[in-house]
Image (spheres, coloured by chain):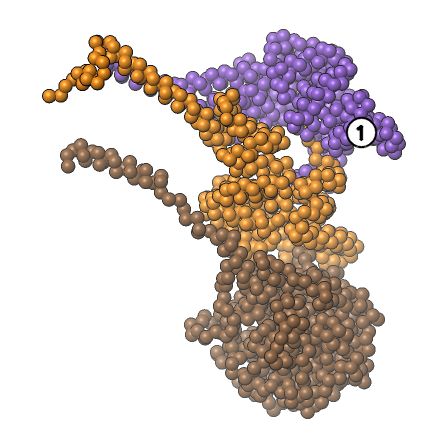
Amino acid sequence: MLFAAVLLCVTAGSAYFVWPWWRATHYLIEARRAMQVADAEGALRALESAERVAPNLAEVAYLRSVALRRAGLLQDFERQLQRAAELGWPEADLQRQSWLAIAQSGDVPAVQRELMALLAEGAPDEVAEEVYEAVARGHLITYRLRDAELCINMWLQWRPDAPQARVMRASLYEQYGDYGSAAADYRAVLSQFPKHREARRRLAQALAWQNKFDQAAEQFEICLSTHPNDAEAILGLARCRRRQGNAEAARSLLEQGLAQNPPTQFRGLILTELGRVYLGEGKTAKAVEVLNQALAILPGEGAVHHALGTAMARIGDKEKAQYHHQRLREIQADYTRLNHVTQKLLDEPNNADLRCEAGEILIREGLKKEGAEWLLTALKCDPNHRKSHQLLAEFFAEIGNRELAARHRLLAASAEASPPTAPPDSK
Amino acid sequence: MVQPITVRLSRVVKPLESRWQLAALLAALLSALAVAAAVVWHRGAADRSFKRALAALDARQFELVQRELARLDGIAGFEPHRHFLRGTVLLAGGQCFAALEEFGRCVDHPELRVRTLILSGQALYRVKRFRDAVGLLVQALEADPQAADAYACLAAAYDDLGLLNEAFQAWSRLAELRPDDFYPHRMMGLRCKDFERWESAVPMYQEALQRQPPQPDRNEILLEMAECQIRLQRWEEALGTLAQCFPSPQRWTKEAECHLSAGRLDEAQQLLDRSLQHSPVDLSALLLAGTLALQQGKGEAAVAAWQRAAIAYPREYVVHYKLSQAFRRLGKEAEAKRHADLAEELRQVRLEFSQLHATAAAEPDNADVRCRLGVLAKQLDRSDLARGWFHAALSINPRHAEALQHLTGQARQASKP
Amino acid sequence: MGRRSWIGVAILVPILAIVGWFVRPPRNPSRSPTADQTAHAVTSTVPWGGASPRPSNLPIGPIQLRDVTDETGITFRHTDGSGGHHYDPETVTSGLALFDFDGDGWIDIYFPNGAPLPGSKADTTPRHALYRNRGDWTFEDVSEASGVLCTAFGLGATAADYDNDGDLDFYVSNYGPKVLFRNNGDGTFQEVTQEAGVADGDRLGAGVAFLDVDRDGLLDLFVANYMKFSYDKHFVVFRDGYPEYPGPKAYPPDRHSLYRNLGDGTFADITDASGIAQHPGKGMGIVCADYDRDGDTDIFVLNDVFQNFCFENDGYGNFEEVALANGFKYNSEGMALGSMGVDCGDYDNDGWLDFYQTSYHRELPVLFRNLGNGLLEDVTVGTGAGQGTLNNVKWGCGFVDFDNDGWRDLFVAMGHLQDLIDHYDETSSYRAKNVLLWNDGQGRFVDVTDRAGDGMLPVFSSRGAAFEDLDNDGDVDVVILNARDRPTVLRNMYYESGGRNHWLQILLRGVKTNRDGVGAQVRVVAGGLKQIAEVHSGRGYQSHWGLRLHFGLGPHDHVDRIEVRWIGGGTDIVENVPINRLAIIVEGHGIAEQPSFFVPRQ
């Protein structure tokens, strides 16, 4: 009896200490699987659970930092990396993650040498994939598409089945307007990883761009079957239904999307689509109502002005119709110019003037944050680019960041007297 | 002699023929007890589940809340509780309107009413419907005058509506209910400082500091308190406060101001140089650099510093005023006039901005005044303040055209392709 | 007890202690003030009003002022006419005037007074009061005997010999028609307002001053007006349930007036012609001074919560408002303050007249340093000229060399205008101590209020302050008018407490220029010490003093030279002037004979 009791105690004690570790390991595996299919949300969820059961496990902290980095949450990433350091995770890994974050945020040249050295030294496959991914993302963010293409091709050459590489290449094809090739890549990813949410959603959109609405709808439906609240999927499917002539289904989907209180941007797009549906159904007054709401959110969206122009013409308000049509022309002209600029950038990636112009267009059409990002890339090419500084000063002033606005104003003023700076060597 | 239990039992019940029968009887009794216990346990499980959910909610463990919510599915009599928990999860996810719908379905449940009202108030606050938030929070407090969370949100709502007296009352009450919380005193100190009631602000900050705020709040409180002490001309006191702050350009600039006012120009210069090296666009540092240069008889240097400030902060009244005076001293009348005219224009805007604050406080239902405050804030290059005022206008009148126009012209969510 | 029991105790006690630690009661929540306590505490860090007993262990500073009010026999008690309606005029009454009306060599005192406003009652009709200085620290009320029986709502006063007949006349600024009293030369006055044409309508007056705008030897009159107050537009604001005066922002500005002396006892209104009319304001204290040393008198007007004015004279009575250009308009931060009183004096002995203005609660006063090129610079913070003044309203002020060391000190009269402020603002109070700032001669001021004798202890809601040598002993004394209360008279005990610095007082007698020498600048050179002063009529907070110029000479036992630049006249130089006395300098004739009433100090 005594022996049994001791054995019981020892077992219970062991279980008590081993159980959290076992549970944490289970969550870690789940997280790694999610990261494999670029499901950052899923990975973070699993890692939060792991942290709850094993709050002082360095591996959890480290993996969490990686997931945050890959999800683009760089401020949280830094905090988590610091935590991993405190818990004693190896310095080399931490250093590498810092480099990857820098590369991923667009400043590839700053860490290119270190990352290439890692690859040259024969880093493990997992590390190599991280490097390729971060560098490719960095190039994509700064619209260095050729460099991104080169990096992704090298990655695929080494790992033809790397899902993330294929997804990134597909997005490159989309930038080039080659939706067919993009769809092919997405399908290839899905054949291996049917649960790859991003690939499926993007496949659906690529198909929609090719006007293959039936196939696109099918894909959107699969997306919604696993994530019924996916606003993008709802919108995409509704568009497909409308184009298939099923206005009622489209309307129902859009109303469902609105009821879920999506982020403002999507709300605007959903309202636009709903307005178009109403227009198609001849419900002009309702169309006008929702389109005006959409306009309040997306004042630079061509589709809204187009729909509103049509609606106003129908109800006989010529002046407003003219206004919206004029706005549409202006927006179209802007985006045509933007396309031209981005095309030129493929061959002149270091042209600060082009980047600045792209930013200016986007800001003018209401996409201020995106525009500001373009302006920052212009400054990477030419730190003394006066107009970029001026526009950034206006942007930061508008969002209430007085210090950055002041900084850019001063830089613009001093740039007036300075010659343009040669762009950094990005190779 | 004590008789064996079996003998005693046999006098009461039909005599048992064997141990096995006794064992069977005992087993049956135990089973019955176990079943009864299970029934009682099951009945209390839902309550326990809900309590665990509430604890998880307080600890912001929303996954656990979801899990308990799943456990409550299908249990009769817990429908309002499910709505409540769903609402909290939605609110945590930022889906305020959806959360409000859920809360609307459980607000009348007596056990949940107060918490629901408070969370609804918080949801409304987050979507900038401050007036509505106040209404619900006041109801919550009528039901439970000790609800500290309600006071916290109520104070914030009053603050955003420009109703400072009410905000102060709410913060004061919150301070009573949460004696260890530094936040209410910090906010009261900050508002006193904003309204230049330096003498009142300092004791508020001291109270906040005594409650051991964590960093970086502690550092911010010390910096703000030091600024009040500087305005009260208590230079040495301010230096003592600043010595407790993290080294930073803000700290060095304030220290420079103290030394300058005490006549220690060299120390002031060193600190200012350090501050500007780290933060070349710090407005206070640039203004002080000009003042220091002027005291040293270096008019041109003063003008240079203030010109930098004018470029960096083109709508800052005091910069243009000082520049106009400095140019006059240098005999540059044209420049002096230009800056003086601009200063006067900005002064009028500031005057109206300041006067309208009092109007806003006196007229809590006036959306136009709040919209006008937003417009003036924009003219003063304070888009952050402008946004707040436009939202305040919309919280009173959601269809206020001008406020909507300004806001949508201001803000556009990022769209990720 | 057995071993087991001891073990049990040994285990139990620590457990109980640990449990006890965790269940200890929370911190006392009442240690921090509640909103109610903060808002409604009637606390005050200073004792309630009135004279205080003389503690015997006060620290000693360079300046010693003693409260001798009780000895003076002055029974005047100010009223602001309040009846609970909180009319704004109640807050701004009044200044006072110090001048030798009977020419006996002893400075007398004129106290304007308020009057019952609608809704208030008074058992006896309050009146202004003229007190004759007997020369022994007692004063005699000669209001009736002198014919100065004014019962108007008084705000300010100034004095000068406007008709150049050898005696001082005075002018009182009221809420309603202002009053000009002409001195008959026999200790009596005649009211000649209508005849002179200087009633200035039915307005809320403020500071007033005599000055020679066109350098014709006749003193003209500048009248500042406060604002267009009217009873039917009056309203009360409430703070925490307590009524407050609405203040100047509630009413529009009013125009100031300028009257030219025609030399025949009458004045002509030249407000429009002079350019003054284009600048209505909310006038409070004023001072007229030749700040740019171009030989004519300019006018400095403080406007309450409004931009200040500096009317620059072209020498012929035409004025251009230049405050923005010369830096007088606002403080260094470009802010218009709740401006109250202004005085003029060369605090740094650089030969240029500087200015000091008082201001409202939570505002610093402003010391404007004259840079000498037509520009004034706010140097308040760097000089410490605002110490001790932030938490109350500041009114009368003066540049006065109390310790005769050759450097002008600053006296600031303090007291709030919101009479119920003690109920809702624990950082301030209706009554307050005045402030004394000693000039260290190095460009900085030191707050010596707590070391300046029992004269700085009284706590009143002070308004006007004026500074003259009331006992002719060579140091400058102080008279303060306190709202709703009796005045304070402070005797300078510099010599009685062992002070040894020398001094000189100068009285000017114009011949071609105005008889009092108003507007004349005097430069005194004593070894390395060079000082300037100017004769003003009307200064501080709607007050008057200083027709007799006072110079502290420090250790210098002789004066090398005195230069007098007469307004509209030439320059007289007098050398080797004896010290520690009053010197009367007559235009074109040098020093007149030493008057008999003066006892030179050894």
Q: Secondary structure at mark 1?
A: helix
Q: Is residue B154 above or below residue C152?
A: above
> In the rendered image, which residue does mark 1 sit on?
A285
**Quadrant of the rendered image containing residue B117:** top right
Q: Position of residue A144 (x, y in %)?
A: 70, 22
Front residue of this view, candidates A85 and B327: A85
State which chain disc 1 sits on.
A
Q: Residue at x 78, y 82 (%)?
A: C194
Q: Is residue C494 visible?
A: no
Q: Position of residue B175 (x, y in %)?
A: 49, 47
Tell me, what hue is chain A? purple
Quarter of the C terminus of chain B within the rendering: top right
**Quadrant of the rendered image containing residue A111:** top right
Q: Is residue A143 above or below residue B228?
A: above
Q: Is residue A391 left or right of residue A30?
A: right
**Quadrant of the rendered image containing residue A422:** top right
Chain that the image shows in orange: B
Badge count: 1
Q: Residue at x 49, y 68 (%)?
A: C47
Front residue of this view, candidates B48 and C463: B48
Q: How crowded is the residue under tag 1: few (<14 C-alpha within 10 Å), some, or many (20+)?
A: some
Chain that the image shows in brown: C
Task: Determine the residue located farthest toward the left in the rendered image.
Answer: B1
Quarter of the N terminus of chain B within the rendering: top left
Q: Position of residue C363 (x, y in %)?
A: 61, 60
Q: Residue at x 80, y 68 (%)?
A: C277
Q: Is residue B30 visible?
A: yes
Which kind of residue does numbered mark 1 sit on? Answer: Ala
Q: Is residue C65 above or below residue B191?
A: below
Q: Residue at x 68, y 30 (%)?
A: A264
Q: Is residue B391 above or below residue B20?
A: below
Q: Position of residue C445 (x, y in %)?
A: 56, 65
